Image (spheres, rainbow, N blue to C red):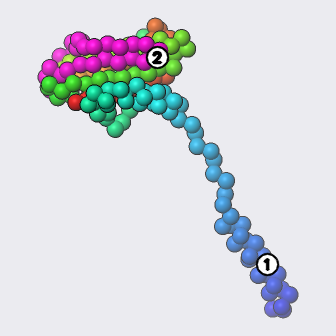
Amino acid sequence: MTMRSLSSSFGLWLCLVVFATAEKPQPSPTPDPAAPLRARLLDFGGALANEGFRSRDSFWSGRLEPGKPQRLAVNLFAGNQYWFCAVTDAPDGSPAVVVVYDPQGEPVQGLDYGRDGLAAVGVTAGAAGRYVIEVKAPRGAASDFCLIYLFK
């Protein structure tokens, strides 16, 4: 092998190494459609944190369609206080409807709040067990929603 072919081979090898190790462009991450709703919801829930409530580490989000409520089953403990807070992106700012059902399937009476796309219901669990949280579309309009719950 001549010196000329050796240097050509080395140059080709160097180009392949540089090309192979060059950073490839990464696809941009898909934006989280629930992020703005979650931010609004956490601000809303922050006021309850001042009252001693702690937020669960997770949140739930999805799409509310008229006549098709979203349901979430949670285990609650007797005597504990809970707030279930939801925010929607309804164009007219109307809030979702949040209803809590006890282990027997009966609606639990509590404190209700609804304004500017925000809805909340505060309840005290009468018995330990599986409760169902139902979130309904605001005034029949389809919208995205995000839900958190707080407890103490």
The single residue placed furthest to the top in the displayed view is 139
Q: Position of residue 14 (x, y in %)?
A: 74, 76
Q: Position of residue 53 (x, y in %)?
A: 27, 30
Please tell me how crowded label 1 is: few (under 14), some (14-19), or many (20+) other residues with Cα within 10 Å.
few
The C terminus: image quadrant = top left
Residue 16 appears in view: yes
Task: Specify start and end residues of the magenta stretch as a single range.
Answer: 104-128
Q: Is residue 140 magenta?
A: no
In the figure, is residue 56 to the left or right of 80? right
How far apart are the two marked residues, 1 and 2, measured between alpha carbons? 64 Å
Residue 62 appears in view: no
Q: Which residue is mark 1?
A: 11
Three-letter amino acid code of the residue under disc 2: Gly
Secondary structure of the residue carrying numbered label 1 = helix
Q: Which residue is mark 2?
A: 117
Q: Residue at x 51, y 30 (%)?
A: 36
Splitting the image into 4 quarters, where does residue 52 fall? top left
Q: Nearer the viewer, mark 1 or mark 2?
A: 2
Toward the viewer: 49 or 126? 49
Please tell me how crowded label 2 is: few (under 14), some (14-19), or many (20+) other residues with Cα within 10 Å.
many
Secondary structure of the residue carrying numbered label 2 = loop
In the figure, is residue 27 to the left or right of 131? right
